[in-house]
Amino acid sequence: MQEYLLDERDLRLLHALQIRPRAPWTVLAPVVGADAVTLARRWQALQDSGLAWITSYKGPGAKYAGAIVEVDCVPASIAPVTEELARDPEVLSIDQAAGGRDLVVTVQCRSEAALGEFVLDKLPSVSGVTSTRTHRGIKLLADAQVWRLRSLNEREASRLAIDLPEPGNGQRGVPADVESGLAKILALDGRATIADIAGWLGISQTRAKNALSALLAEKRLIMRLEVARPYTPWPLAVWYFLRVPATHVEDVAGKLTGLNEVRLVATTAGMYSILMTVWLRRVEDMTVLERQLGERLPFAEIMDRSIVLRTPKHMGIRLTTDGRRDL
């Protein structure tokens, strides 16, 4: 039994932050239905308890080589292997899973050469790893940036999208040191003020604002709200491994992105055509979802699935055993 459950007021606030992670409280207030001071205070409480946070990560506009790696371990070594991998900055996320693999590791490297080094040199040298299967990402069609808590109605969500247009282009050619510094700051605190960012980077507020605007507009940097999954109405996470004929991969993947349960859809160059993660209310919902997939997408064959038992690291952030941000 969890000590705390997110109530509807919290979920409305978090849904609004999913749409616009850095929006001023005064803009979110009329949509969420609480005054700006209350929203700021509630957000601080959610952050301090590790139940929700806003982070950043490299987007499709940035250069990187990504892969999802299945890792098998000696049973007694799962914990130490997880800890060693979690310390690696190239490891974005780690799921400890039940099923045909012990760990599902999401890797984001600066280049193809760096990815090769991680898979061929680093990973095999980790004591306790018995085997690995690497799925080089081809295309990320959906990630949790577009997944929603569904607490705001369609009109309320649309109002936020209209009231807050996408960021402008800002300055072009953001220096590498500024981009790197911004990414590190926002990974820790996605709502850091422009004044704080400028102070930490030692640049003017105008330059900091323009640099952030440019990185967001070019999708070199993605801002995203994260929430402790076990405390949401969807506490169960499942990885699905699908095989689809080459002529139907894009069509099937595109249709999967429209499902409410889906958090990630990626086409890969591995033994599976598509990898997908979903959040569900209960384990019995797996049967319902798989029946729907079979009826709507007859070309998609589910080759395997794994229930996530624990997520020690998520999008670069260490988590506690109950899924909160480790503060």
Image (spheres, rainbow, N blue to C red):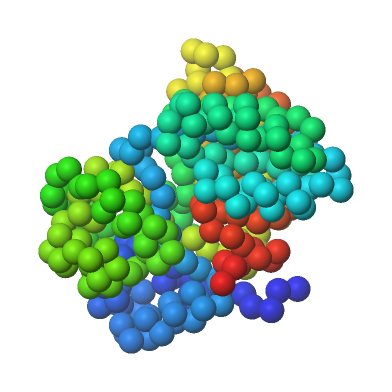
The answer to whether residue 318 is above or below residue 170 is below
In the shown orientation, is residue 262 left or right of residue 64?
A: right
- Asked whether residue 240 appears in the rendered view, the answer is no
Which residue sits at x=50%, y=21%?
249
Please identify the quadrant where the N terminus is shown. Answer: bottom right
64 vs 152, nearest the viewer = 64
Residue 308 image position (x, y, % from top left)? 70, 49
The answer to whether residue 187 is above or below residue 173 is below
Residue 250 image position (x, y, % from top left)? 45, 23
Name which quarter of the figure residue 6 lies in: bottom right
Name which quarter of the figure residue 107 lies in: top right
Which residue sits at x=29%, y=68%?
200
198 vs 255, nearest the viewer = 198
Q: How many marks?
A: 0
Residue 194 image position (x, y, % from top left)? 23, 68
- Asked whether residue 21 appears in the rendered view, the answer is yes
Residue 267 image position (x, y, % from top left)? 51, 27
The answer to whether residue 143 is above or below residue 187 is above
In the shown orientation, is residue 230 left or right of residue 315?
A: right
Please identify the quadrant where the C terminus is shown. Answer: bottom right
Which residue sits at x=23%, y=66%?
202
238 vs 47, nearest the viewer = 47
In the shown orientation, is residue 217 left or right of residue 40?
A: left
114 vs 286, nearest the viewer = 114
Which residue sits at x=27%, y=63%?
201
